Image (spheres, rainbow, N blue to C red):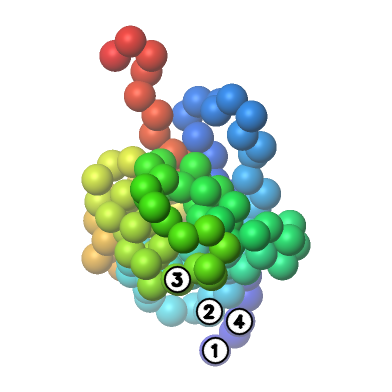
Amino acid sequence: MTEFSVEVRSRTTATLPGAAPAEPIYIPASAELISVTELIGRAVAEQIRSLLLRHNHRPAAVQATLGEYYGLPAEPGAPADEGINLTAETRKARAAFKAGAYAIFLNGRALRALDEQIELSASDRVIFLRMTPLAGG
């Protein structure tokens, strides 16, 4: 099976004050069918790795950045810099997708359900688009 990387970008429908745009990440893939659930898991894992290694963020900062990407509120009383629980962060990202906090597009086509099966190729582009409410709406 041929291994390749798929570009994933995170965007928002509005610019948050002080928020830097997310750099693209590249998730490992091969010619296989995967679910949207698995796609989210791979993207979260790579975003955590990228934020920790490339940007030298502390775990608390990584969790805050993931919250910005996926439209997740900060958890009150969350311990600072005690590490990142990949399973918990992935679960939160999947719940946010299911709740409509962000949408996922594969080559411009909206992915609708966590159990939807997709086949990735090296030329695919994936966008995670965070939805933000309109002011006053």
Q: Is residue 3 above or below residue 91?
A: below
Q: Nearer the viewer, mark 3 or mark 4?
A: 3
Q: Nearer the viewer, residue 13 or 87?
A: 87
When asked about the image quadrant of residue 50, the answer is: bottom right
Dot 4 amino acid type: Glu
Q: Which sits earlier in the primary sequence, circle 1 or circle 3?
A: 1
Residue 42 in view (yes/no): yes
Query: At 57% across and 63% down in the image, what residue appears?
Result: 81
Q: CA distance from mark 2 to mark 4?
A: 5 Å
Q: CA distance from mark 1 to mark 4?
A: 6 Å
Checking the image for residue 1, the label placed there is 1
When asked about the image quadrant of residue 135, the answer is: top left
Q: Residues within 10 Å of mark 1 (few under 14, many from 20)?
A: few
Query: At 68% across and 57% down in the image, what residue appears?
Result: 57
Q: Which residue lies under the disc numbered 3? A: 85
Element class at badge 4: strand
Q: Which residue lies under the disc numbered 2? A: 30
Q: Which residue lies under the disc numbered 4? A: 3
Query: At 73% across and 61% down in the image, what residue appears?
Result: 56
Q: Which sits earlier in the primary sequence, circle 1 or circle 2?
A: 1
> In the visual, does 72 lie left or right of 4?
left
Dot 1 amino acid type: Met
The answer to the question of whether label 1 and label 3 lie on touching residues, with beta carbons closer than 8 A, is no
Q: CA distance from mark 3 to mark 4?
A: 27 Å
The answer to the question of whether label 2 and label 4 lie on touching residues, with beta carbons closer than 8 A, is yes
The answer to the question of whether label 1 and label 2 lie on touching residues, with beta carbons closer than 8 A, is yes
Residue found farthest to the bottom: 1
